[in-house]
Image: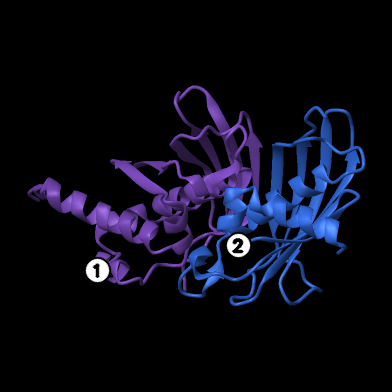
C-alpha cells in the first residue's frame, strides 16, 4: 500500500486553530476575562492580559485571587478538553464549521478545584499551562501552573478534578 | 444593616475593581462572617448552551466573601490575601438566578485565618458550591 501523502501544513494548522478558537471564543466568561490561548502543536499556553478589572487590592496593586482562580480553572478545562478532543480534531471527526457556529461538544465539568497562591499577582500579563495527569473514562485530574515575568517563578498553581462527558451521548 | 455597616459594605466592594466588575453586592458583614450576592449576568456564562455561570465566577465570589469574613473578624486583620482556596462544585447554578455566598472565619491565629463558605441560588436547600480556605493576617 502506498503511504498517504501528509496533509498540507496550512490545512492542518487551519483545522487546529479553528477548533481552538471555537472552544475559547464560545465561552462568554473567557471573553470577559480576556483570556486567549497560544498554540504550538498540541501545547497550549493561556494568556491573561492585564486589565484594571482584574485587580483585587488597588493599594499594592495585586490581581484578585478570584481572577487568578478563574484563570487557572479556564486553563485546566480548555487544556483537558483540548487533549480529549485532539484525536477527533486530527481525524476530522469533529466538524470545525459546526464548532464555529457554536455547536460545541459536551465539555468536562469541574468537581473540585484547589488554588495555591504562591506570591501576589502583579499588574502584568499572566501565563498558564495545564498538565493532564490522569484522564479516565469518567474522571480526570489536571494540574495547572501560572507565572508572570519568569517561567520558573510561579505565582499560583492549582489542581482540579473533572467529570468527563459521556462518550456514548 | 445599620447605616455604619452599610457604608462599610458599599466601600468594601467599591474598593475591589474585580468584584465591582462582577457585580457583587455585600449584603452583610461582621464578627467574622460575610454574605455577598452576585446577580446573574450573561458575561459570566461558562456554558453557552445551558446559560450556566462559569465555575471561575463562583470561585471569584467565594474568594471575595472568604476574604471579607476574615477581615471582619473581631481580632481583625488590616488586610488579607489568599494562601489557599479549595472549591467543591455540587451542582450547576440555575441560569437567571442571583447566587449568594456566605462565609465564616471559624478560626484565626496571629498569622492565618481559616475560612469556609457556601454558595446557593434560589434553592437554599441544595448548595451550588462550598469552599475552604486559608488567608494571611496582615499587620494591624
* Mark 1 burial class by Cα count in 10 Å: few <14, some 14-19, many 20+: few
Residue A94, above or below A160? below
Q: Indicate the position of residue B102 as horizontal and vertical percent values.
A: 80, 59
Describe residue B59's horizontal placement relative to residue B110 as left or right: left
Shown colour of chain B: blue
Q: Indicate the position of residue B105 as horizontal and vertical percent values.
A: 86, 46
Residue A86, above or below B134? below
- Camera-side residue: A81 or B106? B106
Q: Secondary structure at mark 2?
A: loop
> Are the residues flagged by discs 2 and 1 from a single subunit?
no
Q: Residue at x 65, y 53 (%)?
A: B14
Shown colour of chain A: purple
Quarter of the image for residue A120 reads: top right
- Camera-side residue: B33 or A162? B33
Which residue is identified by label 1? A97
Front tag of 2 and 1: 2
Coloration of the structure image? by chain
Amino acid at each position: 500500500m502506498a503511504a498517504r501523502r501528509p496533509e498540507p501544513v496550512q490545512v492542518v494548522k487551519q483545522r487546529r486553530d479553528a477548533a481552538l478558537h471555537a472552544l475559547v471564543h464560545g465561552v462568554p466568561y473567557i471573553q470577559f476575562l480576556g483570556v486567549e490561548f497560544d498554540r504550538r502543536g498540541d501545547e497550549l499556553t493561556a494568556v491573561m492580559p492585564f486589565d484594571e478589572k482584574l485587580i483585587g487590592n488597588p493599594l499594592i496593586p495585586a490581581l484578585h485571587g478570584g481572577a487568578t482562580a478563574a484563570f487557572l480553572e479556564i486553563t485546566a478545562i480548555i487544556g483537558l478538553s483540548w487533549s480529549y478532543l485532539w484525536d477527533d480534531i486530527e481525524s476530522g471527526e469533529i466538524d470545525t464549521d459546526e464548532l464555529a457556529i457554536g455547536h460545541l461538544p459536551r465539555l468536562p465539568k469541574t468537581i473540585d478545584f484547589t488554588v495555591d497562591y504562591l506570591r501576589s499577582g502583579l499588574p502584568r500579563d499572566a501565563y498558564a499551562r495545564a498538565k493532564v495527569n490522569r484522564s479516565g473514562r469518567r474522571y480526570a485530574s489536571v494540574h495547572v501552573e501560572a507565572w508572570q515575568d519568569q517561567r520558573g517563578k510561579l505565582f499560583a498553581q492549582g489542581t482540579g478534578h473533572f467529570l468527563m462527558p459521556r462518550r456514548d451521548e | 444593616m445599620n447605616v455604619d455597616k452599610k457604608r462599610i459594605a458599599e466601600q468594601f466592594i467599591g474598593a475591589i475593581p474585580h468584584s465591582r466588575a462582577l457585580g457583587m453586592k455585600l449584603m452583610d458583614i461582621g464578627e467574622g462572617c460575610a454574605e455577598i450576592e452576585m446577580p446573574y449576568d450573561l458575561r459570566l456564562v461558562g456554558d453557552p448552551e445551558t446559560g450556566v455561570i462559569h465555575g471561575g465566577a463562583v470561585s471569584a465570589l467565594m474568594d471575595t466573601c472568604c476574604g471579607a469574613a476574615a477581615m471582619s473578624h473581631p481580632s481583625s486583620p488590616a488586610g488579607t490575601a489568599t494562601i489557599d482556596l479549595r472549591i467543591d462544585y455540587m451542582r450547576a447554578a440555575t441560569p437567571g438566578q442571583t447566587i449568594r455566598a456566605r462565609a465564616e472565619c471559624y478560626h484565626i491565629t496571629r498569622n492565618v485565618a481559616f475560612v469556609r463558605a457556601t454558595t446557593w441560588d434560589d434553592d437554599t436547600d441544595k448548595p451550588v458550591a462550598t469552599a475552604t480556605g486559608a488567608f494571611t493576617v496582615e499587620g494591624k
